[in-house]
Amino acid sequence: MGVTFSLLRLLAWRRLKEEPFRLALTLVGVALGVAVFIAVKMANETSTRAFENSLVAISGKTQLEVSAGGLGVDENLILKLRAMRELKRAAPVIQQHVWIRGAGGSGARWRRGAASQGSAVLALGLDLLGDNDFRGYEFENKYAREEILSRIADPQGLFIARGVADALRVGVGDFVEVEAARRMRFRVRGVLKPEGMAKSMDGRLIIMDIGVAQEVFERFGRLDRIDLILEDGGEIESIREKIQKFLPPGAIVERPARRGRDVEKMLASFQLNLTVLSVIALLVGCFLIYNTMSASVLRRRGEIATLRSLGVTSKGIVSLYGAEALCIGLAGSCLGVAMGVFMAQGALSFISQTIRNLYAFLEVRHVLFGPRELLWGFGVGLGVSLVSGIFPAIAASRQSPRQGIVERQGKVEVRPAAIAALVSGALLIACLAYWLNLQALAGGTPWPGYLSAAAVILATALFSLPVVLCGSAIVRRTLGGALSAWLAAHGLGRHPHRNAVTLSSLAIAVAMLVSLIIMIESFRATVEVWTQQTLRADFYAAPASRFIKGSRASVSEDALKIIGGVSGVAAVDGFRAVRLPWRGARITLAGGDFRIVAERGRLLFIDGDSKETLTRARTRGEAVVTETFANLYGVKKGDYLRLPAPGGEVPVRVAGVYYDYTTEGGFVVVDRAFLKKHWRDDRLSSLAIYLTENARSEDVRKSLENVLDPTMVLISNAGLKKRVSSIFDQTFAITYALEFIAVLVALLGVATSLSSNILERVHEIGALRAMGLNRKGITTAIMGEAAILGALSVLAGLASGVCLAAILIFVVNKLSFGWTIQYIFAWKGMAAYLLVVVLASLAASWLPARAAARIPIREALSEE
Amino acid sequence: MKKRFALLLAVIFSLGAAPAHPESWRQALPGYRYQFPRDHGAHEAFRTEWWYFSGNLQDSRGDGYPFMLTFFRVGLRPGAPRKSKSRWLLRNLYFGHFSVLDAKRGRHRFSERISRGELEQAGASEAGLKVWLRDWRAESTSEQGPASLRISAAAPEMKLSLDLKPAKPLVIHGEDGVSQKAPGPGRASHYYSYTRLLATGALEIEGRRLDVRGTAWMDHEFGSNQLTKEQVGWDWLSLQLSDGRDLMLYLMRRKDGSVEPTSSGTLVEADGRAAHLRLGDFKFKGVNTWKSERSGAVYPMGWEVEVPAHGLRLRVEPYARAQEIESAGSTGITYWEGGVFAESVSGEKKLTGVGFVEMTGYAPEGRPKF
Amino acid sequence: MAHPLVELKEVSKTYAAGDMRIHALRDVSFQAEQGEFITVSGPSGSGKSTFLHLMGAVDAPTSGEVFLGGLEISRLSDEGLSEIRRKEVGFIHQFFHLMPTMTVYENVALPLLLQGRKRAEIKEMAENALARVGLSNRMRSFPRQLSGGEMQRVAVARAIIHKPRLILADEPTGNLDSGNSQNVLELVAELHKEDGFTVVMATHDQMPLRYATRRVGITDGRLEEGC
């Protein structure tokens, strides 16, 4: 052990000191891989934990909850529950999302749409006199305590968490405006200490007495939830079953943890995707280390031979080089962890923004990290170094003592048998990948799809050596006339293994990039086509708080009449969406005006005409479902769904399945009259407004703004499309970021590999220079080598990227999220990116090439 | 939780430090015009209000069961209540106290209730006597003639249901319609009683179901800001005498041990005529004491009650000493409320009587803050 | 009489190089006693180096047996062979094979380091060895700062520092001018006299032959005595 350490110090460390540039490149490469991995991991864990904490904090000591989706439970139910002997306490809860803003005493009016300038917060309506059994919160101000009851009873009173108070810069006694179903003015009657429940979601929480909440949200006669605490010694499951039996249809009783399950599942898929991406950079880093180490081993074969002749065992050599790899790994990990912690903050803001856009209301600002995450980072970095460094180390130890002493580096022979083996192996794996995809599609889970993607990557790696050899042969034959080209090709063939590794890493990074670009652009194009075809209304209106994910804000039906009365308006389609518990999950039941949609709008059905299907659905009380719904629950046209409604279960036939890209989880849509009849709900979530032929858009907009309640936001068709687009971009921004980092690491690999190559061939360069090749020629030859390598990598990457994209689009995405995406290959964009990669390879080679050209001839010719 | 809530509650009643609301509670001032049956109902403009029933019941064997049932209403915000479709909107808090003494066995039971009035679970009508707290009720019935009442309450191990018929018309205490508790306008309440009600009904106690009858007393008081900071509590007495007369006395006690000069009482003749008694007109003095183990309070036990002008010299004794009530779960007040009996000490006629004594503010914690 | 230090019994060695098979040694039998100074002559590619490698536990024969100090080393594991190299053998190469990143002192001390000896011990022995080769003043220099002759002398010091019984020199003067060659050879002869180790030196130079107590030759893989 001590011997190994001494040798490390005397040999490896001193050598590395002489080549700081290469060491730095390697370290940065490793560090980036580790950094990305940790950043994504930490951001994912932080957001998951924040989400869970928010659920737990809000549930407090609740053991069971009664809820009925978006429509709420009948408030009288709480009396029935209180009569149950097994229950100790039952508390009413109203939970909604609202915009809140500080309001000056003067009561200045907000601009329409200014709600979004405020803060999105979670509003809880609770029985503040009795809720302390369930949730913990304390008021900051001792003064407020003395008057607590009077303040609680204030029908204009509100209590805000410290987080909100800081964000809005308000305190006790100040006025705020809250936008929900209506815009209402409140007086802050107390500020909650940032503990327990009031700490979750970064403190974006307001609470009010339950009666006040019913008024604000116009939830008369209903509660969002009834929280229950059982008598001591009660068995939760049997009590739960007992309660479920007497609940009306549509209401469910469950443990609090299950409430977030739907969102958590979707979150998990999203996070898995990110994790897989983050691993790519790490994988590429692997190749980097492998290359560096094997180049190092090759250059130091003389040293190895001497050591062997001095009596160092093979194991000793393995330890020596293994330890070297570990040290690089350690240093890279340190750097990587530091970078990762830094990057995690950025990753978190991306991720939480996406979660906010797509999944749930979540506020989380600060990355949580502790020793565990750091250990992960080190573990991963060291693991990667060890795994990729061990092979060169073993190769070094296999070098027979005789070899190193006697031979000078001649051309590395690659036996045709080996090439054949590689090619057939690669083809075999490609077939395996194909088979795996079929399995995935048959089985309905995406896991085989992920495996097949891994298989494709493996096949790419295996193909790399044949490609290098082929490529160099082809270039030699076609461009062999030009000396530089010939030299470049020759150089490529000189170190086929090393170049193959470099090519693999770059090709894989490129493949991932290509596949992602294809997938994202296909997705974007599909969605654009879809929005073109289905978003047909001229304006859309909705309560501003509807833009907070998870919001249940609604407006009264009267809006239909009001808007309908505006001149220039031809039709108004009122849309209502509520969450409904069904088959153990929560689905969205929606109601729209099928007549209007049939005539003026359009849904793209998988099978069937829009107008016919909608008319049929309207007249016969049938439903149309989105494709994601159909895929997720295995439902098809003609099936019957049994939907729970207040009056009992309602069987609804599926009239058709249509494409939709606005939500995950899926919609079941019925005609709104049907919804009203069976679910007794007459409110609206949003409206689609169609103008007459000759109406002038701007004029109508002004008239609409005059009549609409200021809490409503009005968006034009173009505006909505833009919004869809921007959410799209936001969501994939982080994906792009991760990908570029992987490519960067791969390019670092190119640079290190090339400079290793050069050192190998110092002699040859010297000989060439002695023969009269000028500096420019050397530079061109080496850069040419890089260019060819880059081009080959790009081609290989393109080929596998195209396959990977197909896997992503047709298998992984389809099975994870349920969308159909058209495979669209965007030539222009792609070509641009790939050209950039080739140029980058060239750029990466420039410095090493120049350095090579500058080596004085005498030095180049002299012996080691 | 209950303790904390009660603490909050007890605190809320201390209005000395409370800032003024833009709207204020109505004060109990002289000149109030009483109108019945409307004034039997709740007075939302006033802050605190209670309907108090007590009585001495006997079963068929003659065993005695003094009982007390009180409904409290506490307003949280002054001003006219808003019309709202929400059945949860907080306006008043309602409390109930219910106690029964098994005089033979000396066992005293107490139960308390509290409600914020959601979903009509508790309330008090403003039109007439109808006040309820879940399944505890007190309301006028017209089954047994005009102005008869029914009260009922249930608790673990005791359940009461009584029909009450006034044997005399109601009596308004105090002077000029206002019962002054301390000097100063508003330091008073509007206070009237049915001093003699005939009670019949059923009592279930410890699983025994008994038919009971006896006499009962009803108080209805409402006001805001009654007590001052210098006052710690009061001693109150009600008696129904064998010669048909009824007596009510109260002493407001101050921190320094003295008695508020505005303390007063009422003597009601057999024919219903009422005479107001000023502090100098009567004597109401504790003879012995009794210390409560639970609260550490030392209560006067056994009293000398004299109203010389009306020829009354009585000795009043409790049916049992341990009739203290700790209401940590509702009002947070600790007080002594128990059935008593009286005997004349001297004078021509031999008089007896039954009634109730109430003493508040003796426990270091749990002082009333009305 | 003690058994010979080195013995080869009908040893053959064959390599594969591409598609060809090279017979480096054919049925060679050989013995060397402790203390001999043997030169091995022969043209390039004749198998001289292979001959040395087999003796020095650097390589294993295709057939036949190799004995070192009475111990059969031909079938030893890598561990065993390494140990032998550490303890019993010292190599001197044509191209010196010094570690460029280590100082003269460190190069010389390397065999002792590998044996895991203590620092103090190493220091004493290294300084001693350097003194014996006359390079005490160059202890802190790096190989690139030395001339060819100096480098080879460092190699010699390294070869003898651990007091091996066998010194194998493969064309030690191949890369030196005549002056330096002479110096190095005299140094080796002197050390040989002082320490009594066995020297087997492969060379196609004439100069070393002078110092030999015995000469053998290898042609086409076959050994001949007295050339």
Image (cartoon, rainbow, N blue to C red):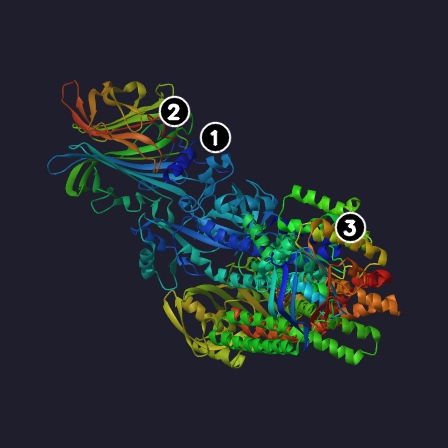
Residue on which the image places disc 3: C142
Q: Is residue A308 visible?
A: yes
Above or below, B359 against A405 in this view is: above
Q: Which mark is residue B231?
A: 2
Query: What amino acid does circle 3 point to?
Result: Phe
Residue beneath the point at 51% across and 71% down:
A448
Q: Nearer the viewer, residue A715 or A650?
A: A650
Q: Is residue A520 visible?
A: no
Left or right, A770 with respect to A707, comes to: right
As helix, strand or loop, the secondary structure at mark 2 comes to strand
Residue beneath the point at 59% across and 53% down:
A378
Question: Which chain does tag 1 point to?
Answer: B
Q: Position of residue A485 (x, y in %)?
A: 81, 74
Left or right, A745 with respect to B66, comes to: right
Q: Are marks 1 and 2 in contact (CB under 8 Å)?
A: no
Above or below, A607 against A730 in this view is: below
User: What is the CA distance from the residue labelled 3 to the residue labelled 1?
Assistant: 90 Å
Extreme residue toward the front, this view: C1
Question: Which chain does tag 2 point to?
Answer: B
As helix, strand or loop, the secondary structure at mark 3 comes to loop
The residue mark sitting in front, 3 or 2, is: 3
Q: Which mark is residue B222?
A: none
Left or right, B163 with respect to B36, comes to: left
Residue on which the image places disc 1: B17
Q: Nearer the viewer, residue B262 or C59?
A: C59
Query: What amino acid does circle 2 point to?
Result: Gln
User: What is the CA distance from the residue labelled 3 to the residue labelled 2?
Assistant: 102 Å
Q: Position of residue A442 (x, y in %)?
A: 48, 76
Question: Which chain does tag 3 point to?
Answer: C
Query: What amino acid does circle 1 point to?
Result: Ala
As helix, strand or loop, the secondary structure at mark 1 comes to loop
